[in-house]
Image (spheres, rainbow, N blue to C red):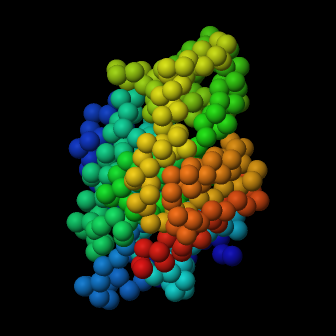
Amino acid sequence: MLPWNAELAGRLERNVIESELLKGNPLGDPHERPLWVYVPPGYDDDPAARYPAVYVIQGYTGHVAMWANRSAYRQPFIETADAVFASGEAPGCVVVYVDAWTAYGGSQFVDSPGTGAYHSYLCTEVVPWVDARYRTLPDRASRAISGKSSGGFGAMITPMLRPDLFGSLATHAGDSLYELCYVPEFGKAVRFLRDYDGDITRWWDDFRSRPSFTKPADEVLLILLGCTACFSAREDGTPELPFDPRSGALRPEVWQRWRDWDPVRMVEPYAEAVRSLDSIWIDAGTRDEWFLDLGAEAFRAELQRVGVADERVHFELFDATHMGIDYRYPLALTWLAGRLAR
């Protein structure tokens, strides 16, 4: 496998979108965002042809430029996605790579006073922008969303909240079943916060004053701070931890705000929207460090319980951890593209 860029059969366009909703966001993050749009081979040959669209969202600390990163013996998803269409394995799709980066490393694709209106940005600004500029099929039956980890979480919840926009999804190890994926991290966080007198803002000041990820606390506390800002920020934007920072005891009212965003628990209140979905891909590694294989099982079970037909769901657990599972992305894309084209 060659270690440098391969020529695409389709075309990737690197756009910039100016967001009105992200102007003045609480963290002062840019409101002009990169938006990459891939068009498949043959797109320019027939000006009348229209295509389904698959929106791809990133995991925590991810941003859109990372889709072009190349690691040893692995091709970036842009190239493996292109290969799916160039080989004829799947009918052509427009693939949209969305950026939802924040200073905390991510937005969880929700609207929050702690980070900004990232759910609304995706749904009410990005989707119409793409439909106005590319020959998409602008309806829910021809639009899917896909992501891994936090992106998998976003892929699960966005069609629940906006079934009018997205009729299909793919989630790779998406955040779910919070008592297993998050609560164990709280204990680690409390121990790390001892060095900061229980004050996560003191850690944040320290983190920004030095090279990132040079202390053992950094990964755990960054994810904690970011998710807290997304799920349980006060109205003034201040992140409110879901546990006591000295004892680790859960704060029930604040913790409930997190639980309300657990995709497993969202299935019941959004059952009608979930039942309307045409295609749902769920996968995870059996050795996932955040137990997201169990979250995937629980999410699937809830779908079955509320009446989602098995033929609409692809469910798979495979031998892997949470890391290095990018080879799964073109598999899900192939499946989604075939179903969107029906």
Quarter of image, res 37? bottom left
Residue 163, above or below 252:
below
Q: Nearer the viewer, residue 340 or 275?
A: 275
224 lies above or below 165 = above
User: Which quadrant of the figure contains the C terminus?
Assistant: bottom left
Q: Residue at x 53, y 33 (%)?
A: 259
Tally of numbered tags: 0
Place of residue 174 in the rendered image (x, y in percent of width and height, measured from the top left): 57, 49
**Quadrant occupied by the N terminus:** bottom right
Q: Nearer the viewer, residue 9 or 333?
A: 333
Q: Residue at x 55, y 79 (%)?
A: 83
The spot of residue 81 in percent (x, y) is 52, 72
Q: Judge left or right: residue 8 versus residue 189.
A: left
Q: Is residue 79 visible?
A: no
- Residue 279 against residue 29 in the figure, above or below: below
Q: Position of residue 106 (x, y in %)?
A: 48, 41
Residue 163 versus residue 150: which sits nearer the camera? 163
- Quarter of the figure with residue 84: bottom right
Q: Residue at x 69, y 31 (%)?
A: 184
Residue 24 visible, this orientation: yes
Query: Residue 66 appears at what percent x and percent y?
Result: 52, 55
Horizontal side, residue 274 vs residue 318: left or right: left
* Residue at image location 46% in from the left, 23% down from the top: 239
